[in-house]
Image (cartoon, rainbow, N blue to C red):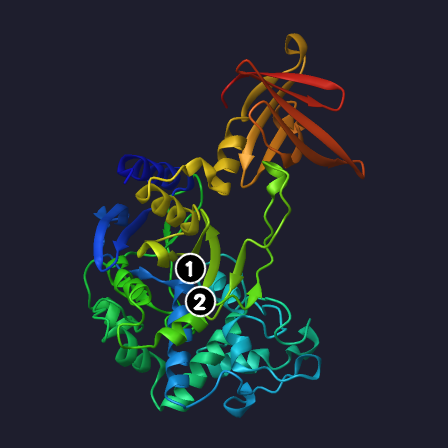
């Protein structure tokens, strides 16, 4: 395992994004082979994180909800082809067709996200959003009941992430099991897997030590304590847990169910059901054709990872982020939790797995893109310093500023091809597309913008 690289990488990305704290654990078969906390779980009091620190698992919770539904299928209490209106007072028929349980599981109801979770999370944390009178799934269904004109496709045709649907699945679990959602998950998943630091209720969390404060993170500012929505968000993102507990959960998938679910049902969860909308950009580095980079199963996301199937789920509730990822063929998995938004936890996870397996990390697309863009940033000048320019990295783009101060002209540069010696970008200018070319000439970086040539003179 390339431990020093991984730890330096995590520290660097946390620093760049002002992320207060993060915990990580890697599991091989049934054994934790690496675990560590980085940064602070409580900034005000200077308290460190640990592998046992508890954070929101956010939408990783959806995999627990999907697992619970598959358990109830095995108990013959429902089927995946059941119309959800058999259990819920929700009667929208996208394009005249019934929404089935399997459509909610795969985010393919035909209804685009209605945004209730984003509205509530942002509102309660002072980030805008919208106040909504929602305290649970019945309120969510009332909120969604007027969405007939929001329908986009027939069920099963297209992926639209639908938090509202996973709230409905939680209600279905209650209807058919006779238990409150939290109690069902505790009795049928958490307790059998000995996940003894995993809870849903605020009163349970408040009684525990080593709990991370959730933070609103803004670059250049001191992180501000935020809030979880303990009751409003449950089956779609309400679990509070630790990375140590999540490794026990991952081990269940790696070992074929550990008696709480059959291998056949796990296979159902891990079968691609619908393509997610992100396409690869092979033209950045090669001539290969674009293809979907991820598919959604039932509560799990499936991707390619060095030619193997990578399975997992991410989570983001504004003030906390999460990721579980595992490689079935390697019997290897990783869990990551953080107390704020920052560098993508999915990318932390892929870097951790690649580091453990000692893979060529530069082959990871996000890493190659990040490195290629970062290598082009800096201060530039035209001939004899007549014009100044600055290039900075912004997400997966470059920002070009020509001139200085308030009068600087700003352009977004979208990558077309990224290479060692030449990289091409485009921007839109006066309603037309304009190519911008960067060259590495014996270690000297230059770029051409319209009529001008600029040479890099130093870092930002």
Q: Secondary structure at mark 1?
A: strand
Question: Mark 1 or mark 2, which has the lower sequence index?
Answer: 2
Residue 197 in percent (x, y) is at 22, 66
Q: Secondary structure at mark 2?
A: loop
Q: Residues within 10 Å of mark 1 (few under 14, many from 20)?
A: many
Q: Quadrant of residue 72?
A: bottom left
Residue in the foreground of this view, choosing between 125 and 89: 89
434 lies left or right of 401: right
Q: Is residue 455 left or right of residue 197?
A: right
Q: Is residue 117 visible?
A: yes
The vertical placement of 288 against 112, above or below, is: above
Q: How many marks?
A: 2
Q: Which residue is mark 1?
A: 311
Q: Which mark identifies residue 457?
A: none
366 or 127, nearer to the observer = 366
Q: Which residue is farthest top? A: 384
Any part of residue 132 in sight: no
At x 58%, y 22%, the residue is 421
Q: Quadrant of residue 247?
A: bottom left
* Left or right of 319 in this view: 453: right
Q: Is residue 314 above or below residue 150?
A: above
Mark 2, residue position = 270
Residue 431 or 439: which is nearer the viewer?
439
* Residue 259, position as x, y percentages in the image: 26, 77
Residue 269 lies in quadrant: bottom left
Query: Disc 1 vs disc 2: Cβ atoms closer than 8 Å?
Result: yes
Please state the horizontal and vertical placement of residue 171, each as a whole percent of the image: 44, 83
């Amino acid at each position: 395992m390339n431990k020093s690289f991984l730890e330096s990488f995590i520290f660097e990305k946390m620093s760049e994004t002002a992320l207060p704290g993060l915990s990580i654990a890697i599991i091989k078969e049934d054994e934790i082979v690496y675990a560590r906390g980085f940064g602070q779980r409580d900034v005000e009091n200077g308290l460190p994180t640990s592998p046992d620190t508890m954070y929101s698992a956010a939408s990783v919770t959806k995999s627990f909800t999907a697992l619970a539904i598959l358990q109830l299928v095995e108990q013959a209490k429902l089927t995946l082809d059941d119309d959800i209106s058999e259990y819920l007072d929700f009667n929208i028929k996208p394009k005249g067709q019934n929404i089935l349980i399997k459509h909610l599981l795969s985010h393919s109801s035909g209804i685009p996200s209605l945004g209730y979770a984003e509205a509530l999370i942002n509102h309660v944390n002072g980030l805008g959003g919208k106040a909504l009178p929602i305290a649970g799934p019945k309120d969510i269904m009332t909120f969604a009941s007027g969405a007939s004109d929001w329908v986009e496709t027939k069920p099963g045709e297209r992926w639209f992430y639908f938090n509202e649907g996973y709230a409905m699945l939680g209600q279905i679990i209650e209807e058919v099991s006779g238990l409150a959602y939290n109690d069902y998950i505790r009795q049928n998943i958490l307790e059998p897997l000995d996940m003894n630091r995993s809870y849903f209720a605020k009163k349970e969390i408040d009684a525990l030590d080593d709990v991370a404060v959730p933070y609103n993170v803004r670059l250049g500012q001191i992180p501000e304590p935020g809030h979880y929505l303990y009751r409003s968000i449950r089956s779609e993102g309400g679990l509070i847990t630790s990375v140590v507990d999540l490794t026990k959960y991952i081990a269940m998938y790696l070992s074929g169910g550990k008696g709480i679910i059959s291998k056949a049902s796990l296979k159902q969860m891990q079968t691609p059901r619908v393509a997610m909308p992100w396409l690869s950009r092979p033209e950045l580095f090669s001539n290969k054709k674009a293809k979907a980079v991820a598919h959604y199963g039932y509560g799990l996301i499936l991707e390619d990872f060095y030619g193997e199937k990578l399975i997992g789920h991410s989570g983001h509730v504004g003030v906390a982020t999460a990721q579980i990822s595992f490689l079935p063929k390697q019997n290897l998995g990783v869990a990551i939790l953080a107390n704020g938004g920052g560098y993508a936890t999915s990318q932390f996870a892929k870097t951790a797995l690649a580091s453990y397996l000692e893979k060529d990390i530069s082959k990871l697309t996000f890493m190659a893109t990040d490195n290629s863009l970062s290598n082009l940033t800096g201060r530039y000048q035209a001939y004899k310093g007549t014009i100044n320019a600055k290039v900075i990295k912004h997400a997966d783009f470059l920002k070009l500023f020509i001139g200085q101060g308030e009068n600087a002209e700003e352009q977004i540069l979208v990558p077309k091809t990224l290479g060692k010696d030449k990289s091409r970008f485009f921007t839109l200018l006066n309603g037309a597309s304009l190519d911008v070319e960067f060259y590495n000439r014996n270690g000297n970086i230059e770029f051409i913008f319209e009529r001008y040539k600029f040479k890099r003179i130093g870092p930002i």
